[in-house]
Image (cartoon, rainbow, N blue to C red):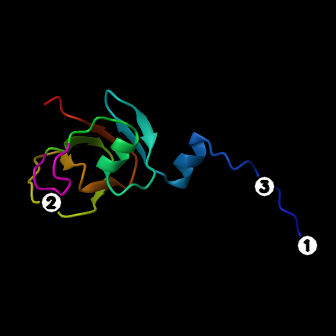
Amino acid sequence: MKWVKTTSTVSTSKERVMSGIPRIKVNNYSTFYYQYEYSLLDAMEAQDIPAPYNCRGGYCGCCRVRLIDGDVEEVQDALYDTVGDEILACCTKPVSHVEIEIPDE
């Protein structure tokens, strides 16, 4: 029988980057690791970040944010048309480290 030495179960930030857990940076708020919530909006709410929203279905555009860096994928189809680097937080989730900006509006 071969014994394998295990290390602590506490993960460091270096381990999280290497394991592929997306990091979310929200300008003027905080940086945190995605915990596999349904959407980017849900992830921000879990961190007590005051993200604007209304319908949660991609109809109104209230949850639009600017994607500064990184990649996201759609978790539901949106009827609201975004422009340029805008994404709807209720309709997307990160697939890489992302940096977003919540508009001042």
Q: Position of residue 27 (x, y in %)?
A: 31, 31
Q: Is residue 45 left or right of residue 105?
A: right
Q: Which mark is residue 6?
A: 3
CB within 8 Å, label 1 to label 2: no
The residues bearing labels 2 and 3 have C-alpha atoms spaced at a distance of 45 Å
Q: Amino acid at mark 2?
A: Ala
Q: Is residue 27 left or right of residue 14?
A: left
Q: Residue at 55% x, 54% y: name it.
A: 19
Q: Residue at 37% x, 47% y: name it.
A: 43
Which quarter of the picture shows residue 32? Answer: top left
Q: Position of residue 84 (x, y in %)?
A: 13, 46
Find disc 2 in the rendering and name its residue.
Answer: 78
Camera-side mark, 2 or 3: 2
User: Counting residues from the N terminus, which is met first, the one under dot 3 or under dot 1?
Assistant: 1
The 10 Å Cα crowd at callout 2, few under 14, some 14 to 19, many 20 or more, is some
Which quarter of the picture shows residue 1? Answer: bottom right
Camera-side mark, 1 or 2: 2
Q: Amino acid at mark 1?
A: Met
Give the residue at the far bottom of this rendering: 1
* Residue 98 appears in the rendering: no
Magenta residue check for 91: no
User: Counting residues from the N terminus, which is met first, the one under dot 2 or under dot 3?
Assistant: 3
Q: Position of residue 85 (x, y in %)?
A: 18, 45
- Element carrying mark 3: loop
- Element carrying mark 1: loop
Find disc 1 in the rendering and name its residue.
Answer: 1
Q: Nearer the viewer, residue 57 or 23?
A: 57
User: Counting residues from the N terminus, which is met first, the one under dot 1 or under dot 2?
Assistant: 1
The residues bearing labels 1 and 2 have C-alpha atoms spaced at a distance of 55 Å
* Span colored in magenta: 53-61
